[in-house]
Amino acid sequence: MFRPLPLKSVRWRPLEGEGLEHLTIGPSEAGIRASSVLIGERGGRPYGVRYTIDCDAAWTVMSFNIDTTAGQRLFLASDGNGHWRDADGNALPAFDGCIDIDLAGTPFTNTLPIRRRLKPENGIAKLTMLYVPFDTFEPFPDGQNYTCLEEGRLYRYEAEDRSFAADLPVDEDGLVMDYPTLFKRL
């Protein structure tokens, strides 16, 4: 079990290339708000990104906003049951069933399914994430599996196609400490 979330700031750095993420997370009127600024590079292309994710008290994503220093912007909102709308209120049925989001370039979004009480006895949780790559900002559904290895301490992430897996140690708030081959908490 995780403790009630205090207001806190954390930082991660990528293990390849240059970069830094500064995240502030804590309680909000609607539940939980995570706000972050990050700089980095993917495939030799540098980026500067700001994002805000609003969740209800059960850590279900209700909306997120991402914008880059180059002017790209993406805002999507959810009903909490896997139905999404864009900034103009248009339904996005391609993402039906996606409860969680996964933003490229940050280990924070792994916390979303982890905080919703994954337990060892539940086995593998097969999830469809709304994945947002930072190079195109064109989201798509992405199959991901999570397994609780040690409750409140260690979780396994695995791509549905088994092309990548990592065991993720977390702190007392469910925030990733170390993401092997990708990120390290400072």
Image (cartoon, rainbow, N blue to C red):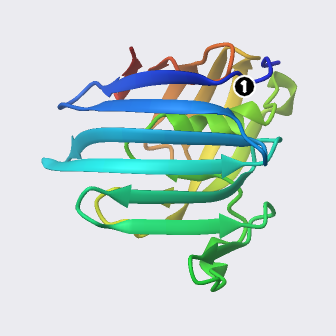
Percent x, y of residue 12: 39, 24
Name the image quarter holding the C terminus.
Answer: top left
Give me the residue at 71% from left, 48% from top: 55
| 111 or 147, nearer to the observer | 111
User: Does the image show residue 139?
Assistant: no
Give me the residue at 69% from left, 31% from top: 147
- Res 88 quadrant in image: bottom right
Q: Mark 1 highlights which residue?
A: 148
Give me the residue at 77% from left, 17% from top: 151
Name the image quarter holding the N terminus.
Answer: top right
User: Does the image show residue 141?
Assistant: yes
- Res 4 quadrant in image: top right
Secondary structure beneath label 1:
strand
Instruction: Indicate whether 5 appears above or below 172.
Output: below
| 179 or 61, nearer to the observer | 61
Instruction: Indicate whether 135 appears above or below 15.
Output: below
Give me the residue at 73% from left, 71% from top: 83
Q: Is residue 144 left or right of residue 79?
A: left
Percent x, y of residue 85: 64, 76
- Under mark 1, the amino acid is Cys
- Res 37 quadrant in image: top left
Percent x, y of residue 50: 40, 49
Most extreme residue toward the front, as rendered?
29
Number of numbered tags placed on the structure image: 1
Instruction: Indicate whether 123 appears above or below 152.
Output: below
